Image (tube, helix red, strand yellow):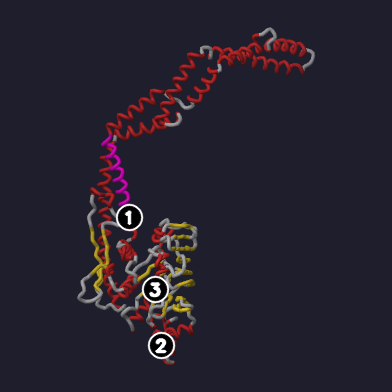
């Protein structure tokens, strides 16, 4: 529901702010004061087209802002707003240079986003471009909600999604099959090239380290010789000195036990020095033929670089590519079997989808007949007693050759048809010309239907066109009942309808300093009496007219 609405610089509106409440609200005013401008502003919020011609003369831009209080589950599930949002604030601006900017909860969004969210927020009846008329899939959804077929429709949708997934998988396999032999030859070459290289993880780093050693062979050899001499190859080496210390420590340990620990420590250090000496000799021997080994290392690194240019930035990525190539090779080698398996799955799933969708079609057609009678009865009570209402359910068998075109909604196309008057051909509901007739038909649909979105704002314009008396009272009762679960806003000229509303707003047009201003005011109880009296008698308001208006308001506005 709309909690607040602010419109600036739209036609004759300079700055208008409305605080709206739940329940049934009425908007009245003299003919030509600009009641439709309010709806124009709301339609801009809903993403409808705007133009610079709508901007108030002398102003730079239109600004329309609305705050909605709404049950947000269905909107969040449609990924239109985050689940954490408690209210929805929509802001639309239109300037002379630009078609408009939209903001949703403070975030700049495309106007298309406002249009996507609008069906969850507001329905406007009396406008021939209403989404219910523009997109007949909404009529199918209406029938499904009425027929309580949502659960089976979801099963049909799930079967359709699985079929389309299988069809995509089959198409991909068939595409690969066409290039299978060529691809297999290419994969064989790649796999053989990588496997022949016998790569191992960490090999490249070890080779680069080994190459650095050989490139610095002379310096390393000099350091090794010097270290070996210090350790074991000179007259005064660490090994000879440690041997002498061992003898001394052993002799001293006979006189003082404390030297036993010293002897053990020197012995352990002597072992370490001997091990170091052995390691230095082996290291020198291993890197003796540096030039030949360096050539081998450079050749190996060059081979690895060549593979990296083709298959990855590291040995790990090359080995990962090898794994994927082998997997693809296996898949291509068994593609015929997989195609056969998928073909069988498609056949089984198509039978399942067709069975469920046909069952859904039968339920829809059965409920459509029942709905036709209810709608005819409702619109008859709303002043269209001779109208005929029909629902056409067109069922088209699934096309096995075009599974991607399967509809998640099933095999049916549903469209509502009506003949408002005797002798007129039955025509699609979307071609109804009369705004008043359309508003009453939509009221009937809304009354009979099972809307899944609560607290939506329903706006009825021209609903009182061509009716009066008991029919007007019946329409008012329907609107009030509808307002128990929704916010209902009705623009009317009839006192019968106005007297049933919980909230009454009056729009007036004033001229000041050669400028026209449209204003709106929420009426008090006494002001409502005077306005209803005006609706009843025009400018000739008497005491009796006022008393009659009071009684009507006290009787109906309970």
> What's the mark number on residue 36?
3
Query: Mark 2 or mark 1, which is nearer to you?
Result: 2
> For mark 2, what is the residue?
539
Element at label 2 = loop
Q: Nearer the viewer, residue 496 or 294?
A: 294
Q: Which residue, given by chain and number where applicable, does mark 1 sit on?
A: 155
Residue 69 in sight in this render: no
**Front: mark 3 or 1:** 3
First-in-chain label (2 vs 1)? 1
- Which residue lies at the image location 41% right of the left edge and 79% below the top edge? 28
Q: Secondary structure at mark 3?
A: helix
Residue 162 highlighted magenta (yes or no): yes
The percent position of residue 361, horizontal first and vertical second, equals 26, 60
Image location (x, y in percent) of residue 536? 39, 86
Range of the magenta residues?
A: 153-179
Q: Nearer the viewer, residue 270 or 96?
A: 96
Question: In the image, what residue occupies the spot 50% across and 14% down?
Answer: 291
The residue lying at 39 percent from left, 26 percent from top is 194
Q: Position of residue 307 (x, y in %)?
A: 41, 27
Name the residue located 31 percent from the left edge and 62 percent from the top edge: 135
Quadrant hosting residue 413: bottom left
**Is residue 438 found left or right of 543 in the rendered image?**
left
The image quarter containing residue 54 is bottom left
377 to 348, vertically: above or below = below
Distance from the alpha carbon under mark 3 to that under mark 1:
43 Å
Query: What x and y, as percent, mark residue 118?
Result: 40, 63
Q: Quadrant of residue 542?
A: bottom left
Examine the rendered structure and indicate whether residue 13 appears above or below residue 303.
Answer: below
Q: Secondary structure at mark 1?
A: helix
């Amino acid at each position: 529901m709309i909690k607040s609405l602010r419109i600036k610089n739209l036609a004759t509106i300079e700055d208008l702010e409305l605080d709206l409440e739940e329940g049934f609200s009425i908007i009245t005013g003299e003919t030509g004061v600009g009641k439709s401008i309010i709806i124009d502003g709301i339609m801009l919020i809903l993403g409808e087209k705007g133009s610079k011609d709508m901007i108030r003369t002398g102003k730079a831009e239109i600004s329309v802002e609305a705050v909605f209080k709404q049950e947000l589950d269905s909107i969040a599930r449609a990924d239109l707003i985050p689940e954490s949002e408690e209210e929805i604030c929509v802001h639309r601006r239109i300037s002379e240079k630009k078609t408009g900017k939209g903001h949703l909860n403070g975030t700049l969004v495309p106007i298309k986003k406002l249009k996507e969210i609008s069906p969850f927020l507001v329905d406007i009846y009396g406008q021939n471009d209403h989404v219910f008329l523009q997109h007949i899939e909404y009529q199918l959804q209406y029938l499904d909600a009425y027929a309580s077929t949502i659960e089976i429709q979801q099963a049909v949708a799930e079967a359709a999604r699985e079929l389309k997934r299988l069809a995509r998988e089959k198409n991909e396999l068939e595409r690969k099959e066409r290039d299978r032999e060529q691809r297999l030859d290419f994969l064989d070459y790649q796999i053989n090239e990588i496997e022949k290289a016998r790569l191992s993880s960490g090999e490249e780093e070890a080779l680069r380290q080994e190459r650095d050693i050989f490139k610095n062979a002379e310096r390393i050899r000099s350091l090794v010789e010097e270290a070996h001499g210090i350790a074991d190859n000179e007259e005064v080496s660490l090994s000879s000195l440690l041997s002498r210390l061992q003898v001394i420590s052993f002799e001293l340990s006979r006189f003082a036990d404390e030297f036993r620990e010293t002897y053990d420590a020197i012995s352990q250090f002597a072992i370490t020095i001997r091990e170091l000496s052995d390691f230095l000799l082996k290291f020198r021997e291993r890197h003796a033929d540096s030039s030949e080994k360096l050539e081998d290392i450079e050749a190996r690194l060059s081979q690895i670089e060549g593979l990296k240019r083709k298959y990855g930035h590291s040995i790990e990525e090359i080995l990962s590519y090898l794994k994927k190539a082998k997997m693809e090779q296996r898949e291509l080698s068994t593609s015929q079997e997989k195609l056969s398996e998928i073909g069988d799955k498609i056949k089984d799933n198509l039978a399942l989808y067709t069975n469920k969708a046909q069952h859904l079609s039968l339920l829809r057609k059965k409920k459509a007949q029942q709905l036709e009678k209810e709608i005819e009865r409702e619109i008859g009570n709303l002043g269209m007693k001779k109208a005929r209402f029909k629902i056409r359910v067109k069922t088209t068998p699934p096309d096995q050759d075009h599974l991607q075109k399967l509809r998640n909604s099933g095999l049916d196309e549903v469209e509502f048809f009506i003949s408002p008057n005797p002798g007129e051909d039955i025509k699609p509901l979307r071609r109804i010309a009369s705004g008043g007739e359309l508003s009453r038909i939509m009221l009937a649909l809304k009354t009979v239907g099972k809307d899944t979105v609560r607290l939506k704002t329903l706006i009825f314009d021209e609903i009182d066109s061509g009716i009066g008396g008991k029919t007007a009272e019946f329409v008012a009762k329907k609107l009030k009942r509808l307002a128990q679960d929704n916010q209902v806003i009705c623009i009317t000229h009839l006192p019968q309808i106005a007297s049933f509303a919980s909230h009454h707003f009056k729009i007036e047009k004033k001229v000041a300093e050669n400028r026209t201003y449209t204003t709106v005011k929420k009426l008090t109880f006494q002001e409502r009496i005077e306005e209803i009296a005006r609706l009843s008698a025009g400018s000739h308001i008497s005491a009796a007219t006022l008393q009659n208006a009071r009684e009507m308001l006290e009787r109906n506005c309970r």
